[in-house]
Image (tube, helix red, strand yellow):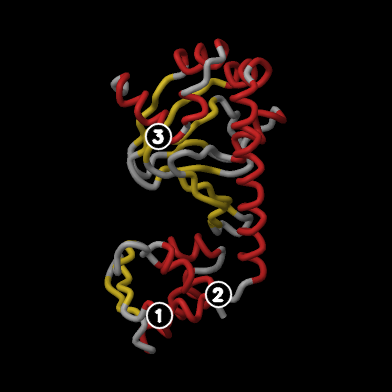
Amino acid sequence: MTLAMDEKTTLLHKYFATLADSREPALQQLLASAHIVRLQAAQPVFHAGAMCQNYLLVLKGSVCVYLTTITGRDVVLYHVGPGESCVITTSCLLGGNDYPAAGVTEEPTIALAISAHQFQQALASSTDFRQLVFANLGERISQLIARIEAVTVGAIDQRLAEALLANARETTTVTTTHQQLAAELGTAREVVSRHLKQFSAHGWIRMRRGTVEIVDRAALAKLSCR
């Protein structure tokens, strides 16, 4: 499906102003030829072992990038939201490698798709595009390192409290499952279930099917900062 040109322009100015405002002919040509893609919620974006064909700039929605371990457990690496690109996609395009992980939309998502060929051309000819790509790459790598450190070092109860608060910034209800939280934390579902029951027993949360209600935000915040 296509996106109206005025909405495309509005989203680009909102999330990628450097690109939208650039006067570079090469970049203007790139934006004119790049196409908008609409993805439904829970739609695969790429999978491990696949060739990288497009560089995506997310304009709306969110993509979850995860790794499946040899034991079959899914571990969330990071999320890509509006104004961001996928660091693994960038790495694959720069190195000519296949995807080592998978990506799936978490909600209806709109993105600007730049083909691998267009990406290489723009990288060579556009200073503004090159700066955007490497600035985004540097920022995302730092976040990924912090994420790996948290998964391998942080205590489960502390990280679980942090995850619940992060997913309930503007509400008291988190729509999620024990399995999704386990993937987010890089642990087993049974471990998450056990800690959630402890949180519930303390009166910090209230569990319902498919949701977790935050009852004592202060207690969770204290635990997450421990």
Instruction: Measuring from the top left, give residue 188's x and y in whole percent.
Output: 52, 69
Q: How dense is the environment of label 3, judged by Cα within 10 Å: few (below 14), some, or many (20 and up)?
A: some
Rendered residue at 57%/12% (across/down): 26
- Cα separation, mark 3 vs mark 1, equals 34 Å
Tag nearer the camera, 3 or 1: 3
- Three-letter residue code for mark 3: Lys
Instruction: Measuring from the top left, give residue 112's x and y in whole percent.
Output: 44, 27
Q: Which residue is mark 3?
A: 14
Q: Which residue is mark 1?
A: 218
Query: SS for tag 3?
Result: helix
Tag nearer the camera, 2 or 1: 1
Q: Using residue 143 as the reference point, say whether residue 83 is left or right of it.
A: left
Rendered residue at 47%/30% (across/down): 17
Residue 215's quadrant in the figure?
bottom left
**Quadrant location of the N terminus?**
top left
Residue 198's quadrant in the figure?
bottom left
